[in-house]
């Protein structure tokens, strides 16, 4: 499933945007002009990675300084130990689209419990 997120022209290089989904998705436009999409929630604790610091192909979590590789989702080390889920990005006619991964998201325990409670209430 392809989701249109934003116009590429509206996402400056070195910036990120957040797409509200379940879970939310962060889309990053690197200084080199590459565009990546990952789950927006740090796998260590409930923090928005789109609020983090982008450097090259890595984003640093704003809470505890774990860095995630935007290409693979892998963290550079503690406190985050599990990778964030990555998504395919396609740019068509100047619009950034994200194809969501089929993998199960690696959400922190509090987020996963909250998500299960919401799903159970439906």
Image (cartoon, rainbow, N blue to C red):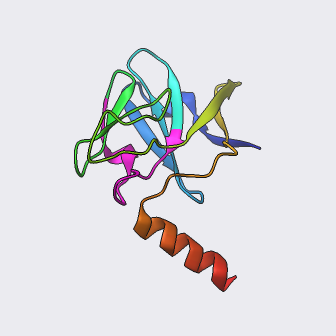
Q: Is 22 a magenta residue?
A: no
Q: Residue furthest right?
A: 1
In this picture, residue 74 sits left or right of residue 99 = left
Question: Residue 14 lies in what quarter of the image?
Answer: top left
User: In screen coordinates, is 114 left or right of 78?
Assistant: right
Q: Nearer the viewer, residue 27 or 95?
A: 27
- Whole-percent x, y for residue 61 in the image: 30, 44
Q: Nearer the viewer, residue 45 or 16?
A: 45
Residue at image coords 42%, 28%:
12
Image coordinates for residue 74, horizontal then vertical, percent: 43, 34
Q: Is residue 48 magenta?
A: yes
For the point 65% across and 81% down, the residue is 120
Q: Position of residue 104 (x, y in %)?
A: 62, 52
Instruction: Identify which residue, 62 or 91, lies in the foreground.
Output: 62
117 sits to left or right of 67: right
Q: Quadrant of residue 66?
A: top left
Quarter placement of the N terminus:
top right
The x and y percentages for residue 34 are 50, 20
Point out the residue furthest to the top here: 32
Considering every residue shown, the one lying at the far left of the view is: 64
Residue at 70 percent of width and 82 percent of height: 122
Q: Which residues are magenta?
A: 38-54
In the image, residue 62 sits, relative to residue 55, either above or below, namely: below
Across the whole image, how many numbered discs are drawn on residues? 0
Residue found 34% across the figure and 21% down from its top: 56
């Amino acid at each position: 499933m392809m989701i249109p997120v934003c116009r590429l022209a509206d996402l400056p290089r070195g910036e990120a945007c957040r797409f509200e989904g379940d879970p939310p998705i962060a889309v990053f436009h690197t200084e080199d002009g590459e565009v990546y999409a990952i789950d927006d929630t740090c796998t260590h604790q409930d923090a928005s990675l789109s609020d983090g610091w982008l450097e090259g192909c890595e984003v640093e979590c704003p809470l505890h300084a774990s860095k995630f590789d935007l290409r693979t989702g892998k963290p550079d080390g503690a406190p985050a130990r599990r990778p964030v889920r990555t998504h395919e990005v396609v740019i068509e006619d100047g619009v950034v689209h994200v194809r969501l991964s089929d993998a199960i998201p690696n959400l922190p325990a509090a987020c996963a419990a909250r998500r299960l409670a919401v799903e159970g209430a439906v």
